[in-house]
Image (spheres, coloured by chain):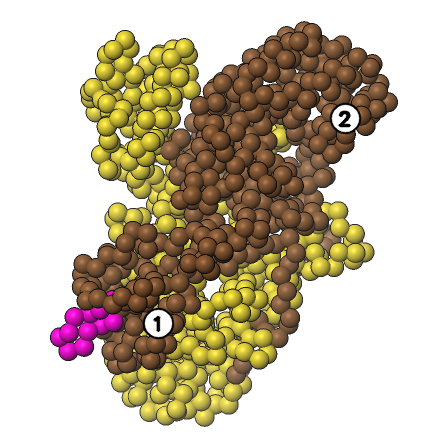
Chain colours: A yellow, B brown
Amino acid sequence: MTSEKAKAAPIRPLSGFPELLPAQRYVEQQVVATLARTFELHGFANIETRAVEPMDQLLRKGDTSKEVYVLRRLQADDAGADDRAKGIGLHFDLTVPFARYVLENAGKLEFPFRRFQIQKVWRGERPQEGRFREFTQADIDIVGRDTLSFHHDVEVARVMLEALGKLASPDSIGLPGFRLQVNNRKLIQGFYAGLGLDEHGVDEVMRLVDKLDKLDPATVRELLLTEAGVSDDQADKALALATIRTTDDSFVARVRALGVEHELLDEGLDELATLVRACAPLATERTRIEADLSIARGLDYYTGTVFETRLDGYESLGSICSGGRYDALASDGRTTYPGVGISLGLSRLLVTLIQRGGLTADRSVPSVVLVAVTDEESRAGADEVATALRARDIPCEVAPSAAKFGKQIRHAERRGIPYVWFTGAAGKPDEIKDIRSGNQVAADRATWQPPTEDLRPQVVTHTERHSS
Amino acid sequence: MTSEKAKAAPIRPLSGFPELLPAQRYVEQQVVATLARTFELHGFANIETRAVEPMDQLLRKGDTSKEVYVLRRLQADDAGADDRAKGIGLHFDLTVPFARYVLENAGKLEFPFRRFQIQKVWRGERPQEGRFREFTQADIDIVGRDTLSFHHDVEVARVMLEALGKLASPDSIGLPGFRLQVNNRKLIQGFYAGLGLDEHGVDEVMRLVDKLDKLDPATVRELLLTEAGVSDDQADKALALATIRTTDDSFVARVRALGVEHELLDEGLDELATLVRACAPLATERTRIEADLSIARGLDYYTGTVFETRLDGYESLGSICSGGRYDALASDGRTTYPGVGISLGLSRLLVTLIQRGGLTADRSVPSVVLVAVTDEESRAGADEVATALRARDIPCEVAPSAAKFGKQIRHAERRGIPYVWFTGAAGKPDEIKDIRSGNQVAADRATWQPPTEDLRPQVVTHTERHSS
């Protein structure tokens, strides 16, 4: 009777659907735990939303750049018997589902509502480094009913800075230095309006100036003249604004020096200056905050603060952490829900650090101890040792077979398990061997405790692991 | 400029895709943490697999009862330009992806390989109580290369019993009592072979006897005679075997009394007796282990031990936790990977307990403290208090507006936050109010500590919450 769940077919990875080995997955779990703990310290509640949304919600923005995966039940009647099931697709971000969740549960939520959400999302894009078809995002958002004070923009920035700062610690994954770039849509739009552009002109100029990360300024200037039809002076000032970058609120004087006046510009300058000043105390040599007046987040519907984040040495990844303020994250026609949030591209960050930097854990199993088995008859005795250790929260496993002790030690070594326990025969004490040093000493299963640094796997780089 | 991510359309839940409110989600997080911690104590490493598998893998068993969701990229060329992407679907369990993961990474894994996996799976089934289209499973499996000792069957049973036992604690979710039912395919198949049935007859009788949970014995007996073509004596003995249920190894004598002899029967009896004896020490009044010789897990390709689990008072849910031994979990044609595992239907269990039992948390946010704001000018001072508390791992949030203190206290109350912090003005000490008792005392932001039971939300039933 043969029975196989998977056989003979050649197995190859699916491009764009990254998977991790156990030791790498341990690193991801640690990152998720650090993020979750930080968000909870700031009062953010966790939620999960279903993986699917109705297609009309997913395509609402008319933005087809995020290629949606449509679902169909294999046995559904293709003639349309199951329209409801046909009309669903996998979510491509966590904002669309969150907006829907807020509307669906508005009567049961307390506003302002702080939530974090760490889930997979799917996009049928062409895979490349840091761009996947299945990936995990970590989002924080604060949503209000009718109104949401500006200080919440400051709050989400500070919370994400604190979370990234923790990941930068050598105790964590030693995230490289990074730069949080902030801007404000009111500032840009007010500036363009102050230049005399109408609403259409404002949108066109914003769209073209946003191309500065791909095109050189002369080309963008040419496009501003030909496509947006602005004057030389308007083009020069729009480009001048986009070159302003400061790490403090001195950008205000530089914008003022361009001589443009508009009420919305004043509001944007004021908000951005407040944000930069409030984030400044969190800055370090590795954690940098910068007002960058070229940031617009073109296609997304932000209405005030906007965020992007660049990782030192990984600039080709683009922004690893982006977001901003929506005056209407959601609306049911009667009530409007403004929101502000930031989304961290967890897979983009982590899979790249794993692939390029060899980030991993120093063992592939949670076990601190392998309990050796002298012979199969005494397996129950080895199980008792393991039970005693687990009762004191020490992860361990029992050897799979009563092979020679040398073979059992190599079994532990291959997994990175630091200790092997030998049960004492006939009244002799148990002994424990640290297989890194070779030291073997008497040990009491009721009291033995590993050093704290051995209790859980440690995050290391592949290089470190091999040189130690 | 309007900008809305979701609006006017009436929002209704999608049947079969359950979602939780923040306080309910907190319960789910606690359950996941308890399971993960238990599995890790036993040396199981966590992995996640991608949500999709090639359709040929998903349909390998030819079992179309698990309706697969097929994926299609919205902008894919329907004429077949993107065959690869067209040929993928969402996984319907965690066993098929795990078998594929083992083959794909065999050279990088150490065997026997213990893993746990807690992820969503999708089936396009008709939704009903405890049956969803999207749901979470928690699986543990141990897989060997070429061989896998029987003691691992005992191991997975004991680990899952320990995990369920922890969930049964009043400190956890107070899971109702349950019954782990174990059997062994070798026992059944050896018994039928000993009755003189050929391989086809064995399969037929097993399939029909498996219907005893839906049909009465007389009907099944009739089917055995007409459909399987067995004799009266064979039918009577097959039914007699299926009525045997014991909480110890006394089932061996009862099977022997039926006078059937077969080598495979002996092996099955021996394995099952070993399993029942090894699990017996974990039994309590609420955690019961039972050899139930009617359990066969009909459609699944098990080859030895089989498990099912019934929850007291929730029998209509069917088995909440099932699994068994596969002689070939996976095979690449050269090497065979035997495995044994159990899968807990986390959503089936939890969503039902939440809906029927009102399981929830006593607050909807992680915050222990709401820091009140006297006026907007002093918000920075309130932020400093919050920062001081968070530095000592006390989750807190700052009031969203400088409303009257009564209103700020009600803001905390609606969220279930137990304490409100008032920053002392002009040299006066800070004060903290326990809003349950109304007590208000002086407090030092550098040393104040909430009672341990207040530090994190507590799992309660809806009834408890309202009566307290």
Place of residue B440 in the rendered image (x, y in percent of width and height, measured from the top left): 25, 67
Residue shown at the point (62%, 46%) measured from the top left: B130
Instruction: Give above or below for A200 relative to A248.
Output: below
Query: What range is drawn magenta here?
Result: B422-432
Q: Say what secondary structure mark 1 lies in.
A: helix
Q: Is residue A226 visible?
A: no
Q: Is residue A393 visible?
A: yes
Instruction: Give above or below for A75 relative to B431.
Output: above
Q: Chain of mark 2?
A: B
Residue shown at the point (34%, 80%) measured from the top left: B403
| Amino acid at pointer 2 | Pro
In the rendered image, residue B158 lying in the magenta stretch gets the answer: no
Kindly identify which numbered label has been placed on residue B217: 2
Residue shown at the point (34%, 39%) measured from the top left: A361
Tag 1 residue: B409
Spatial separation of the CA atoms under disc 2 and disc 1:
64 Å
Q: Looking at the image, is mark 2 or mark 1 earlier in the sequence?
A: 2
Residue shown at the point (33%, 80%) measured from the top left: B404
